[in-house]
Image (spheres, rainbow, N blue to C red):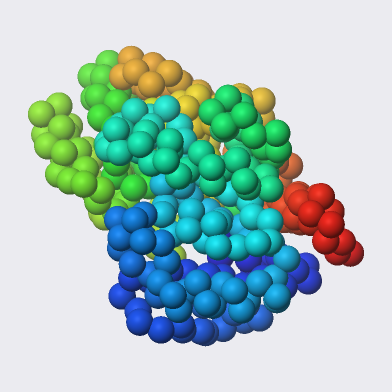
Amino acid sequence: MTHLVKRLSDLGVRTEIWQVDPTCDDIGEQAIGDVRVFTLPSRSRISTAIQGLPAKTRAFIGRRESEIDLVHLHSVFTPHNVSIGREVTKPYIVSPRGGYSAGVLSGRNRLAKAAWMRIREHRYLREAAALHAVSEEEKERLEQLTGHPRVVYIPNAVEARRPRETRVPGAKQLLFIGRLAVRQKGLDLLLAGYAQYLRSGGLATDLVIAGSDFRGGKAQAERLSHELTISEHVTFPGPIYGEDKAELLSTCFAFVHTSRWEGLPFAVLEALAAARPVLVTPETNLGRFVEAYGAGVVVEPTAESIAQGMHQLSRADQHSYEAMQRGAERLVAEKFSWPQVTREMIELYQRVLSRSGIVKP
């Protein structure tokens, strides 16, 4: 979101950020470049669901309404966003970002989610000026789920970067970066597939699974790697940022992402931007792009298919590997670049404002 705000600001769209914080007692403000960032008092999620936003925050929204044209709310099952949508009189857009995928709706707290959808969230979505999908698959899902007449597909974007290594790396290191949510990210499938790959004559390689822990996911994945007797080949460095992340992305042999459900995983876009061939499942919503541009391999979310995909990547000769790198670079440049995505987002804002009778150049 911060990348989008910066890009919008660079193109002359005056943008501000509202962030709710249950630990603060008063309105706070800071500036990031030309962007004003407001911190708003809030209650806990449960208290907000019952009582709404505190009086100070409601008063702030009332005052700021004269200075804004529309509100763009990100994420779902968030009582704070639903309350903001109820408070504002200006049009608002909702970006679920994969939050209504089948895996989410049928997963943890599914009964509470179903009740919340029925009581509050369906109305919140119906009254939105538009819904924003980050993939064509999510667009279709949102249309079926909500019946909203204005669901718009605009993908995530990423900064293109020149890779530090253009030839086939000597060490065939496979890399995953993301939240260690074992079921959603398919880390159990990844580890089982990697074990099959090694046992079926796979070339010497290591698997790096980097990211922040999620509900005990790291311990679960580490335990599974021991049970599969592959722990000597698998490392879990934890969350990585900045230059450490760039180094891993630019020197790994391939990036792997074997999700069971997703919105549009930013980590895969970062890997493509670093010209790394990728191994992805269709559920990442990137499979058709990877196939069309020859930027890697697409596998089914099964251990057998993942192992086969790893063999396909590891056996690539120099010519094939560099072709996948070029495909990754072209894919990012043509489908997921910031200039294109920012223009599309501005066009969406302008259409919403036009329908609302607010005309902006």
Position of 340 with respect to 164 (left or right) is right
Number of numbered discs overlaid on the protein picture: 0
Against 224, is 342 above or below? below
- Identify which residue is drawn at 78% across, 71% down: 12
One can see residue 14 in this view: yes
Against 295, is 128 above or below? below
One can see residue 45 in this view: no
Residue 96 locus on image (x, y percent): 52, 44
Position of 189 with respect to 217 (left or right) is right
Quadrant holding the N terminus: bottom right
Quadrant in which residue 67 is drawn: bottom right
Residue 331 locus on image (x, y percent): 67, 39
Residue 48 locus on image (x, y percent): 36, 60
Residue 37 locus on image (x, y percent): 54, 77
Q: Which of 193 and 179 is in front in this view?
A: 179
Quadrant in which residue 99 is drawn: top left
Q: Which of 349 and 220 is in front in this view?
A: 349
Against 85, is 61 above or below? below
Quadrant in which residue 198 is drawn: top left
- Identify which residue is drawn at 38% across, 41% down: 116
Position of 147 with respect to 100 (left or right) is right
Quadrant holding the C terminus: bottom right
Q: Nearer the viewer, residue 120 or 79?
A: 120
- Identify which residue is drawn at 84% across, 57% down: 357
